[in-house]
Image (cartoon, grey):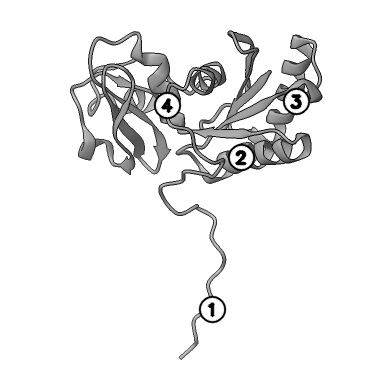
Amino acid sequence: MLLAFDTASPTVTVALHDGEDVVVELTSDRSMKHGEQLAPLIEESLQRAGIVRQDLTAIAVGVGPGPFTGLRVGLVTARTLAHVLELPVYGVCSLDVLAAEAAGQLPGPFVVATDARRKEVYLASYDDGGVRQAGPAVAKPDAVASELPVVGEGGTLYPAAFPAHTGPQRPSAGWLARVVTEELAELYDPDPLYLRRPDAESPRPPKRVS
């Protein structure tokens, strides 16, 4: 049984895949509460499937790009569970997860754009099969405006730059699990894909008073 979860967006998503299909998928009902909600959602998914942690065979986790705090919660949890249970852990770009879900719904090339805050988006471009062609990158919407279909929350937030916004808004743990089991995208080590420096930095030495 594969446990999959993604914390790259404001909400937490968790799923279980039995090797044939997704058997449980849960999404948090509150935003920006990753640390409070991930562990309970994992436990609830196990209970709904009627299994315990020792029944898991692998872990899949979204590596972003996304906010520093949310990604850290997911990746630390994935690495910890993998170490304790002696399981393999597979990282997937969260934009690739959105692309995999959207690929069957769109007739041609498209873009995935998610909210990067600071009035920016995380963005990558894909062919009609959902294979990434460029990115991911972080940019101002106006600088990467596109007439192509745009999947993800970034398209909804910035309709002037992305008038053809469509498809899923945030990564789905169910699709993350499918990406890993069906090898729909490149797999990575469980390391964060930040694309820019975290908001919280170590204090710099005080300036000298002249």
Label whose residue precedes the other's in the sequence (2 or 4): 2
Name the amino acid type tagged 3. Pro
Residue 177 badge: none
Residue drawn at point x = 76 percent, y = 17 percent: 46
Location of mark 2 (residue): 75
Label whose residue precedes the other's in the sequence (2 or 1): 2
The residue most toward the left is: 147
Crowd band around label 2 with a 10 angstrom C-alpha radius: few (<14), some (14–19), many (20+): many
Q: Position of residue 79 (x, y in %)?
A: 67, 41
Q: Is residue 120 above or below residue 157?
A: below
Q: Position of residue 178 (x, y in %)?
A: 52, 17
Label whose residue precedes the other's in the sequence (1 or 3): 3
Label pair 1/3, CB-CB below 8 angstroms: no
Name the amino acid type tagged 4. Ala
Q: CA distance from mark 1 to mark 3?
A: 42 Å
Q: Position of residue 88 (x, y in %)?
A: 64, 34
Q: Is residue 54 above or below residue 138?
A: above
Q: CA distance from mark 3 to mark 4?
A: 28 Å
Q: Nearer the viewer, mark 2 or mark 3?
A: 2
Residue drawn at point x = 66 percent, y = 27 percent: 58
Judge by depth and name the residue closer to the eye, 195 or 58.
58
Name the amino acid type tagged 2. Leu
Answer with left or right where residue 207 lies relative to residue 128: right
Crowd band around label 4 with a 10 angstrom C-alpha radius: few (<14), some (14–19), many (20+): some
